Image (spheres, grey):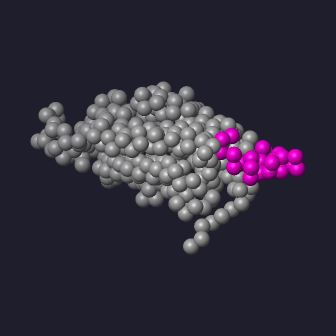
Amino acid sequence: MRSVFIPVEQTQILSQACEAVCYGFLMCTFFISLYIHFNISRRTTQTKVLISIACAMYVIATGHFAISLYRTLGAIESLKPAQSGIVAFLGDKAAWHLITADVLFVTQCILADSVAIYRCWILWDRDFRIVAPSVVLLVGNLAAGYGSCQQLANSEASSLSHAHVRNWILAFYVLSVAHNTVTTCLTAFRLWWVDRYISDHVLHPPLYTTILLLIESAALYLILQVMVLAAFVSHSNVQFLFLGSIPPITGITFTLIYIRIGLRSRYRAQLSKTVQQPDMSEVAETFSIDLSIAESQSTLTETTMTVTERISLDVADDMRPCHVIMHSQPRIVIESPEGRAVVAV
């Protein structure tokens, strides 16, 4: 099967158009996340870290978009008879604008991979054993990414058809896909594993839950990386259409995650003003999720409880609020800022 080939001038224009659309969405989600951040009373360490990273991603995506626009305008200018031509302008791998764009692209990917590890670490209750393989892949990805930038900037290996350069780029793509496959699967599994304990009390349709899992596990970013890798392996310059969109889409992915977390924090802050200490009779209340699943005891009064699983407060920032019906034993202990309630499993 022949690979899909698009002329370089069409590729640049289409790539710029795709990046412009994605950057517009990024602007919307970024400023929404800023609005939410400055309008929530309870800012945890996780929300502060994520909003800082969202700002960094927005700055990098803005820089990449500006350079891509400069390259597009420069390519149009190079069509004049006195200039060398569009292919010569865009094909100069040693040009400062292309080197800068490549460095920003790699930096955005490395930053996104680092955030994925951080969220996975938080969700798995800060267990370094869970994220250790991902950290190893991240180190290798960092070396391959910036090594690719150095090789592309080398005038002696300035073409993508050069085997040595392609090996560096291929290593970067493969390590990036492998890393994000691991972190995405771990994140999605953890969210599903927690959600199944509260599924009897949360009336969410399956499609809603699936969409939330795709958003919160950064699956969109992984899918785009797989598409880029497939295009690169097939020697198709369709890959450049995707490459321009990765920096803004990466920012969109993680600002959406922050919006989800920020809205939950705001929702919990409102609940903390109204939720009172519950009775031990059957009551329906809404709490933020800080779950401790305990073995059954003889009564619903003050008893000693054996904890079989605990999700920490920071992990709770990534969980969903739910409506919990209180019954008899065995039970779940749900803690709110106002007190503790014992809930049936």
For the residue pair 300 and 265, the one nearer the viewer reads as: 265
Height in image: 291 above or below 232?
above
Q: Quadrant of the N terminus?
A: bottom right
For the residue pair 65 and 211, the one nearer the viewer reads as: 65
Whether residue 78 is in magenta: the answer is yes
What residue is at 28 percent from the left and 40 percent from the top? 129
For the residue pair 344 and 130, the one nearer the viewer reads as: 130
Q: Please indicate whether residue 253 sits to the left or right of residue 181 in the image.
A: right
Residue 254, given in percent of the width and then of the height, sits at 51, 41
Location of residue 108 (image quadrant): top right
Q: Please indicate whether residue 287 sits to the left or right of residue 27 in the image.
A: left
Residue 45, given in percent of the width and then of the height, sits at 42, 28
The residues colored magenta run: 74-95
What residue is at 30 percent from the left and 43 percent from the top? 130
**Residue that lies at the very extreme toward the left in this rendered image:** 298
**Residue that lies at the very extreme toward the bottom in this rendered image:** 1
Residue 218, given in percent of the width and then of the height, sits at 47, 48
Residue 217, given in percent of the width and then of the height, sits at 43, 48
What residue is at 46 percent from the left and 40 percent from the top? 143
Q: Is residue 188 visible?
A: no
What residue is at 51 percent from the left and 33 percent from the top? 53
**Residue that lies at the very extreme toward the front in this rendered image:** 156
